[in-house]
């Protein structure tokens, strides 16, 4: 059993196909296009983009919020499942945690991409400089810096620690340079009881710590908007609304990634229909929660009938942005709800269709939060519009390619399913827990 | 380093070897165990399970909180900025920085404790056998007395060791 697990899950690490190189070349090309577009934007200035008065936050900010939201797929979900001891989580956690690490890195790039002089971004770092000035801790952008970096560091450690025993496994099977590399990465891991106990204790404590961090990150991202007195932004519901949306988009992204990995790495024996079904149930729950938040936000604005807010409100309900708004509702609720709620329709392909819709729908949601409020701000004198130009679009495509590229590379370096955690699941004690009837497992989860 | 060890296919056999060694007078703390996965439900793998890691994490969190409070309060006084009528040391907003650094302190303290307690990074022990990665469990005794060697070997053999090894 142990041998089968290791050989199945280490196959991508030890064997490289031509298709893999072709994929890496394609994705690297797209990433380079994105970098070139950024360089073009830097050289010629923001005049080459669609950014113009009064819409100075648009596609880059949409992508920033979108990617930070996607990052909630991993560490948060993994931490929750670890803490509630959901036995089915074992093949899923690392797939999810990798998404968090890379989505955060990519998301955090967008505020830098938006800067006219990104080389001055270090002004955010609190250090005793010769200028004698310090960051303004009242600024939500400084909060972002602290929150995102805390989440990124914690998530990287949460991802890396359980990799150590798997690195040791590769070390013992590899030869030559690869053996040296994995010997360094495994830090001399031997698998003594003390090492196992401390690793498991550390993972438990970190799971507890990461939950509030993850919630704080997206709440703080929502503060970037809600702290400003801009119509439809200045709302107390934004914190939980953003967190719910982040978890929603995160689960959807995780399902899509799992389906791709299952097919590409032949993980059919590990990423089972049960995993898609359980994550699908979570996605359904989040779809309902998302609908609840949207209704709350919209009803309060409509009932308040403030002229400033109503301008934005109607531009999204029946005006210029309404096609995007109703597409968002279709993709986030109308399509996923029946696909995930009706038992007969539940399958891996339907979960992937529903999740793909949600990923697109949630991207639209981020766009609709940001752009209409700025385009219809306060007085008609200051109204304007936004349409993206090619540099923002190429940068966005580059960011998606970067995510795929980083994921492909990491799945080549590390078993994308934690082998030792899967082995623990094979213990008789764990197997007994895993054979709990499906309804009970779902109850435990939800 | 002088050592003697056996490799076992199953936790049951490893437990028998462990019990055999204990019965032959070897202290539990002198027995080395290495396994490819955590086997906490077995006596042989339940040594060293007590840890103060969670309390150290709390201390780390307290350190993070104190650092964040001092960082925000002191630097706001060094370079006073009047923002929107808020006080110079504005604790409502500083709470966010304090929260993040508190949690970061807890995470860093946990990871440092893990690395120190689990002795990582370190050189691989000579006792380590790569077969452990293939699912075998190692039970051994490091630096045994010469007079004990035969007794230990008999105990390890009696538990159906797949392989017996000596390091001289």
Image (cartoon, coloured by chain):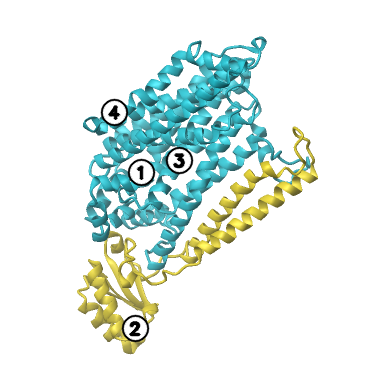
How busy is the neighbourhood of tag 1: few (under 14 within 10 Å), some, or many (20 plus)?
A: few
Task: Determine if residue A446 is in view.
Answer: yes
Q: Quadrant of residue A291?
A: top left
User: Is A125 or A88 nearer to us in this picture?
Assistant: A88
Q: Which mark is residue A446?
A: 1
Tell me if B116 is positioned left or right of A419 in this view. right
Residue situated furthest front in the rendering = A303
Do discs 4 and 2 share a chain? no
Figure chain in cyan = A
| Residue on which disc 2 sits | B26
Instruction: Give the secondary structure at mark 4.
Output: helix
User: What whole-number distance in Å separates the C-alpha atoms at marks 3 and 4?
Assistant: 26 Å
Classify residue A373 by image quadrant. top right
Of the two numbered discs 2 and 3 in the rendering, the one whose residue sits closer to the viewer: 3
Establish if A168 lies above or below B126. above
The answer to whether the residues at label 1 and label 2 have Cβ atoms under 8 Å apart is no
- Write down the residue under mark 3: A100
Q: CA distance from mark 2 to mark 3?
A: 47 Å
User: Circle 3: is it few (<14), some (14-19), or many (20+) Cα within 10 Å?
Assistant: many
* Label 2 packing within 10 angstroms: few (<14), some (14-19), many (20+): some
Side of A61 relative to A345 (left or right): right
Name the N-terminal-most of marks 3 and 4: 3
Q: Chain of mark 2?
A: B
| Earlier-in-chain disc, 3 versus 1 | 3
State the CA–CA distance, disc 4 to disc 2: 62 Å
Residue A102 at x, y percent in the picture? 46, 38
Q: Does mark 3 fall on the same chain as mark 2?
A: no
């Amino acid at each position: 059993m142990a041998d089968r697990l290791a050989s199945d899950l280490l196959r991508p690490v030890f064997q490289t196909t031509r298709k893999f190189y072709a994929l890496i070349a394609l994705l690297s090309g797209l990433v380079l296009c994105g970098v070139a577009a950024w360089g073009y934007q830097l050289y010629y200035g923001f005049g080459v983009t669609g950014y113009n008065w009064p819409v100075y936050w648009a596609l880059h900010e949409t992508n920033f919020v979108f990617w930070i939201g996607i990052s909630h797929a991993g560490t948060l979900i993994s931490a929750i499942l670890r803490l509630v001891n959901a036995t089915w989580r074992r093949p899923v956690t690392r797939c999810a945690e990798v998404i968090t690490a890379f989505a955060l890195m990519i998301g955090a790039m967008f505020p830098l991409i938006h800067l006219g002089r990104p080389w001055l971004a270090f002004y955010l770092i609190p250090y005793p400089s010769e200028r004698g000035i310090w960051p303004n801790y009242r600024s939500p952008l400084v909060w972002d810096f602290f929150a995102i970096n805390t989440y990124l560091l914690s998530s990287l450690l949460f991802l890396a620690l359980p990799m150590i025993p798997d690195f040791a496994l590769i070390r013992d099977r590899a030869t030559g340079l690869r053996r040296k590399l994995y010997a360094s990465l495994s830090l001399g891991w031997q698998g003594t009881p003390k090492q196992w106990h401390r690793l498991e204790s550390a993972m438990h404590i970190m799971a507890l710590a990461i939950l509030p961090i993850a919630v704080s990150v997206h709440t703080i991202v929502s503060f970037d908007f809600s702290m400003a007195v801009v119509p439809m932004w200045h709302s107390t519901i934004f914190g939980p609304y953003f967190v719910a949306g982040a978890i929603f988009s995160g689960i959807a992204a995780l399902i899509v990634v799992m389906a791709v990995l299952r097919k590409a790495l032949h993980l059919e024996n590990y990423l089972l229909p049960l995993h898609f079904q359980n994550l699908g149930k979570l996605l359904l729950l989040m779809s309902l929660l998302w609908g609840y938040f949207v209704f709350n936000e919209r009803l309060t604005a409509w009932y308040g009938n403030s002229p400033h807010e109503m301008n934005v409100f109607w531009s999204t309900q029946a005006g210029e942005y309404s096609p995007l708004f109703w597409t968002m509702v279709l993709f986030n609720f109308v399509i996923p709800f029946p696909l995930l709620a009706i038992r007969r329709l539940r399958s891996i392909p339907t979960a992937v269709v529903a999740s793909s819709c949600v990923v697109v729908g949630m991207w639209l949601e981020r766009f609709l939060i940001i752009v209409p409020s700025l385009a219809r701000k306060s007085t008609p004198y200051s109204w304007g519009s936004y349409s993206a130009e090619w540099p923002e679009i190429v940068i966005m495509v580059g960011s998606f390619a970067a995510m795929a590229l980083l994921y492909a590379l990491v799945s080549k370096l590390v078993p994308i399913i934690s082998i030792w955690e899967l082995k623990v699941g094979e213990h008789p004690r764990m197997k007994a827990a895993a054979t709990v009837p499906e309804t009970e497992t779902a109850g435990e989860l939800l | 380093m002088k050592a003697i060890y056996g490799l076992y296919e199953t936790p049951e056999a490893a437990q028998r070897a462990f019990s055999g060694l204990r019965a032959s007078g070897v202290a539990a703390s002198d027995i080395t165990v290495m396994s490819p996965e955590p086997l906490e439900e077995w006596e042989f793998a339940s040594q060293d399970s007590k840890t103060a890691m969670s309390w150290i994490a709390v201390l780390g969190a307290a350190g993070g909180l104190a650092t964040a409070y001092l960082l925000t309060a002191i630097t706001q006084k060094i370079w006073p900025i009047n923002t929107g009528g808020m006080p110079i040391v504005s604790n409502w907003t500083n709470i966010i920085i304090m929260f993040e650094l508190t949690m970061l302190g807890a995470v860093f303290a946990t990871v440092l404790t893990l690395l120190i307690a689990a002795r990582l990074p370190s050189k691989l022990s000579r006792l380590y056998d790569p077969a452990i990665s293939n699912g075998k469990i190692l039970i051994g005794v490091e630096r045994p007395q010469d007079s004990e060697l035969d007794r230990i070997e008999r105990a390890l053999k009696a538990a159906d060791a797949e392989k017996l090894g000596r390091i001289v």
